[in-house]
Image (spheres, rainbow, N blue to C red):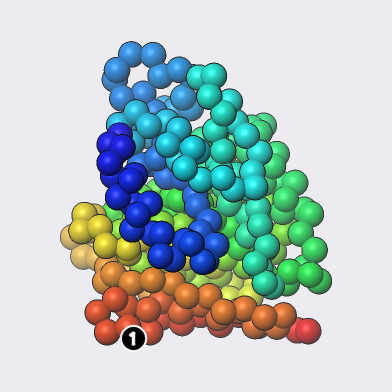
């Protein structure tokens, strides 16, 4: 939000956990910035189809880069060195690849080359599970968020790579809701560009998309109007969705990955996904 005291409050708030538990970060619209109508944007990436706003109020990922230090490549912007935009790490049986949906992710970009290389290099014998993380959703049934723009370009750019690498999960935030998809298979009509989404027979057969943006922000958009005007019909590929606050919890070993969505009110499990793989 462009206010230094908010960063100070946030770092103080997370210290009891971050001091003893790995705190891995991914930048989003409140850390990065496009041109906010204040003159030269210094070369910030903001293609016409993206519609990036100015939710960081000019931070341009600089506080984010200075306060955290992931094992990541660096990126030069306005004579400043930015960190933590895209990187990878291993935790237990899971290989995580973190990408930035706020910086150039299209084919030919430095980020695309990095993600493609990391996907191809994962040793599934050492880390049988593969999760990709980015701030904005690739799929969501929230209103106005799945049809075009950033989501469509993410799908066009990365879904084939995800399929080739057998990515198990894509984890994002941004939408202040929880939603889990089935393992989605997408077909695009070459003539019209229209997308058809179907569910694979098993959740192990394609990538499952998890939107966990329920940390406590009260701002909400409605669910999209699928198939009927003003009637929020849940699409077939959306398995479970809620706007109740909560957290996601992973447990993984060599043969099983369990994800649970735990609600904040009573600490009850509201949704559960189990993926299994032969030893």
Question: How packed is label 1: few (under 14 Cα within 10 Å), some, or many (20 or more)?
Answer: few
In the picture, residue 241 is in which quadrant? bottom left
Q: Which residue is mark 1?
A: 268
Q: Residue at x 37, y 79 (%)?
A: 262
Q: Nearer the viewer, residue 237 or 74?
A: 74
Above or below, 113 relative to 272 = above
Query: From the image, which quarter does the C terminus lie in?
Result: bottom right
Q: Is residue 63 visible?
A: yes
Q: Residue at x 64, y 43 (%)?
A: 72
Q: Is residue 223 visible?
A: no
Above or below, 154 relative to 52 = below
Q: Answer left or right for 182 relative to 73.
A: left
In the picture, residue 238 is in which quadrant? bottom left
Query: From the image, which quarter does the N terminus lie in?
Result: top left
Residue 252: horizontal and vertical position, in percent? Answer: 62, 78
Count the numbered circles shown.
Answer: 1
Q: Residue at x 51, y 45 (%)?
A: 68
Residue 164: horizontal and vertical position, in percent? Answer: 73, 57
In the picture, residue 123 is in which quadrant? bottom right
Q: Nearer the viewer, residue 212 or 149?
A: 212
Q: Answer left or right for 34 relative to 184.
A: left
Above or below, 136 relative to 129 = above
Element type at mark 1 = loop
Q: Nearer the viewer, residue 279 or 268?
A: 268
Q: Residue at x 37, y 32 (%)?
A: 59
Residue 22: horizontal and vertical position, in percent? Answer: 55, 62
Q: Answer left or right for 59 relative to 166.
A: left
Residue 151: horizontal and vertical position, in percent? Answer: 46, 47
Residue that lies at the very extreme toward the top in this rendered image: 39
């Amino acid at each position: 939000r462009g206010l230094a005291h908010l960063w100070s409050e946030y770092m103080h708030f997370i210290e009891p956990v971050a001091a003893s538990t790995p705190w891995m970060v991914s930048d989003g619209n409140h850390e990065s910035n496009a041109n906010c109508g204040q003159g030269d944007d210094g070369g910030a990436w903001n293609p016409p189809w993206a519609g990036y706003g100015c939710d960081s109020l000019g931070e341009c990922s600089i506080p984010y880069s200075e306060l955290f230090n992931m094992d990541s490549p660096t990126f030069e912007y306005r004579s400043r060195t930015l960190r933590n935009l895209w990187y990878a790490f291993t935790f237990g049986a899971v290989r995580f690849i973190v990408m930035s949906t706020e910086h150039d992710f299209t084919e030919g970009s430095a980020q695309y080359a990095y993600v493609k290389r990391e996907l191809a290099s994962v040793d599934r014998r050492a880390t049988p599970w593969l999760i990709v993380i980015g701030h904005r959703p690739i799929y969501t049934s929230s209103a106005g968020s799945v049809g075009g723009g950033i989501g469509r370009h993410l799908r066009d750019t990365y879904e084939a790579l995800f399929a080739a690498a057998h990515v198990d999960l894509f984890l994002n935030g941004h939408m202040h809701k929880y939603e889990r998809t089935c393992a989605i298979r997408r077909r695009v009509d070459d003539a019209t560009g229209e997308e058809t989404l179907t569910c694979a027979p098993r959740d192990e057969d394609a990538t499952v998309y998890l939107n966990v943006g329920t940390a406590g922000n009260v701002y909400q958009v409605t669910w999209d109007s699928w198939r009927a005007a003003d009637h929020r019909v849940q699409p077939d590929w959306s398995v479970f969705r809620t706007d109740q606050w909560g957290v996601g919890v992973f447990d993984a070993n060599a043969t099983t990955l369990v994800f649970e969505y735990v609600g904040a009110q009573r600490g009850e499990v509201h949704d559960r996904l189990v993926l299994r793989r032969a030893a």
